[in-house]
Each structure stands twice: as structure tokens, then as C-alpha cells.
Image (spheres, helix red, strand yellow):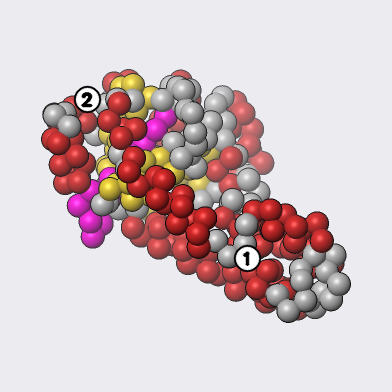
Amino acid sequence: MNDTTAKAIKSYMDLGAYVYMALPNTKYNAEEGGYKNSFNHWEELAEWLAKHPQYKGGNVGIDLDRSPLVVIDVDQHGKDGLHSLKDFLNRRKVDPATISDTYLEKTAGGGWHVFYKCEDKDTKQRLISAMEGLDVLNSGGVIVAPSVIDGNKYKATTELANIQDKPQWVDELGQDKTNSKEQNSQRHARYSVAERWGMIANGFEKGQRNDQATSLIGWLLSYQLHPRKALEIAEVANDRSLEPLSYQELEKVYTSVLKREIAKAKRREANYG
């Protein structure tokens, strides 16, 4: 790790952020726990790196779950998120130029990350497409400067010390969409949360074994559970079934779902900074 990266990490930590490391040229921490392998003290991160040397030249991420930050992710890859943000602010009589008063980063994908301090998070949120080309993130992981993806750098364009408190308008981004998104999610869910817990407790039902195994594994992976842990839980459910799937059949389902989730993640990476 070079001095520039170490200095940036310590600056984020001084702000109260929890920092994790991603593998070189990626946005992923591939260890169990993923981005939750995060630290607010340099000594603890250094100790973790000593045990995981493959991350020493890697990218830098912030665990937003544990950090007092909210990020507006402005996509400029096939969408004009900057136009959406400026239009939104103009309609609320807010000068778009005030965005440059806080901490800004140009992303490797050509978009922008707009950072604000947010000490009192009532809810954890990843509001995707709050508006065209705009996400609002106060949960999950986010890659930050001085990371590099395919030779393209994340670059700070303002000073981290100038980061502002979250303005009211951030909470209004996508406000009208939140409830409808939740309703759509509930309406289209193949199984309820209670039914999925029932699968774990009582096994899969005859005639629905493949469908239920697919749903359960996909649900577990959506919570960023380590893939092998998701398979282990599915194996427990399968073992409790009156007529279990063969291990080969279950692993085939698992492999198919995992490939699908990886493909989704890659599409999200292509669309968002």
C-alpha cells in the first residue's frame, strides 16, 4: 500500500468512517462478510491486511452501514444523472452550485459521488434510481478515491474536510417512489419471508423443491450472505424435506442462482459508479 492510499484511509477514519479493502481492480471484498470487514482504526485494518496480503494493493471502500455518511451516486454512463440532480434542485429553489460545497469524487465510470455527513440514520437505505441516474445510499459498500478500476481512477475534486451536513433535500430525492417500490417488491415476491423461514425449519415441499430451493438461495444471497453459507443453509432445509433433492440437484440449483446474482451485480456495476 502506498502513502497516498494510507493517507486517504486515515482521513476517512478521522471522519468516523469504517473502511474496508477490495481486491485490486474490483469493488469486492471476497472474504466472508464482504464489505463488513471494515475498520475505524488504522491499526486494526493493518492487522487485517497482514492476514490478507492480497488486498494490500487493492481498492478502498467505505462501509456505509457503520459510517456517518450518505452518498448520492450520480450516474453519467448512458444516463444524465447530473441533469436530473440539477433539475431537482432548481425546482426546489436550491442553487445546484452548492453541491460543490461538500465532498465530491469523480468515479472511475465517469459519474460522481456526492458525500454528506449523516449522524442520525433512521433507516438503512439503498434507494436505486431515486431519479433518473441517481441513487441515494446510506447502506452497503461504496468504493472511494484513490481506487482504480481498469486504469480509471476515483478522484476527489473537493476537500474531504469541507464535507457538509446532509441537507433536507437529500431526504426528498425519490420520496414518492419509496412506498411504490416496497409495494411492488411485496406484490411480486414468490414467497414471503415467513414462508422462506418455514423452508429452513421444515424443508421443501414435494413438487416445489426446485422452485423453493431457488427462491431460498436467491433470498439469502440478496442479503449479501457469503455464497457458501447460503448453500449450507439450503442443505439444512433440503435435509429436513420429506423427499430431499439429491446433493447434485441442489448444487445445480445453487450454481444457477449464484451465476444469476453475479450477473446482476455486474450489470449494477456497469450502470452505477
Query: Magenta span has 173?
Result: no
Which of the two discs, 1 and 2, labels the residue nearer the N terminus?
Answer: 2
Crowding near the residue tagged with mark 1, few <14, some 14–19, many ≥20 C-alpha atoms within 10 Å? some
Residue type beneath disc 2: Asp
Residue 175's x, y, as percent?
34, 40
Question: Camera-side residue: 243 or 48?
Answer: 243
Question: Which residue bears the numbered disc 1?
Answer: 215
Q: Which mark is residue 88?
A: none
* Residue at 23% over, 60% down: 78
Is residue 70 visible in the rendered structure shown here?
yes
Q: Is residue 67 above or below residue 79?
A: above
* Residue at 14% over, 36% down: 91
Is residue 62 visible in the rendered structure shown here?
no
Residue type beneath disc 1: Ser
Residue 50's x, y, as percent?
63, 38
* Residue at 48% over, 56% down: 185
Label pair 1/2, CB-CB below 8 angstroms: no
* Residue at 30% over, 39% down: 173
Question: Which residue bears the numbered disc 2?
Answer: 101
Crowding near the residue tagged with mark 2, few <14, some 14–19, many ≥20 C-alpha atoms within 10 Å? few
Residue 184's x, y, as percent?
45, 56
| Distance Cα–Cα, label 1 vs label 2 | 45 Å
Q: How many discs mark residues in the rendered view?
A: 2
Quarter occupied by residue 127: top left
Element carrying mark 1: helix
Q: Is residue 2 above or below residue 228?
A: above
In the rendered structure, the answer to whether residue 111 lies left or right of residue 260 reads left
Residue 202's x, y, as percent?
82, 61
Q: Which residues are magenta?
A: 69-81
In the rendered structure, the answer to whether residue 16 lies left or right of residue 213 reads left
Question: Camera-side residue: 215 or 25?
Answer: 215
In the rendered structure, the answer to whether residue 142 lies left or right of residue 87 reads right
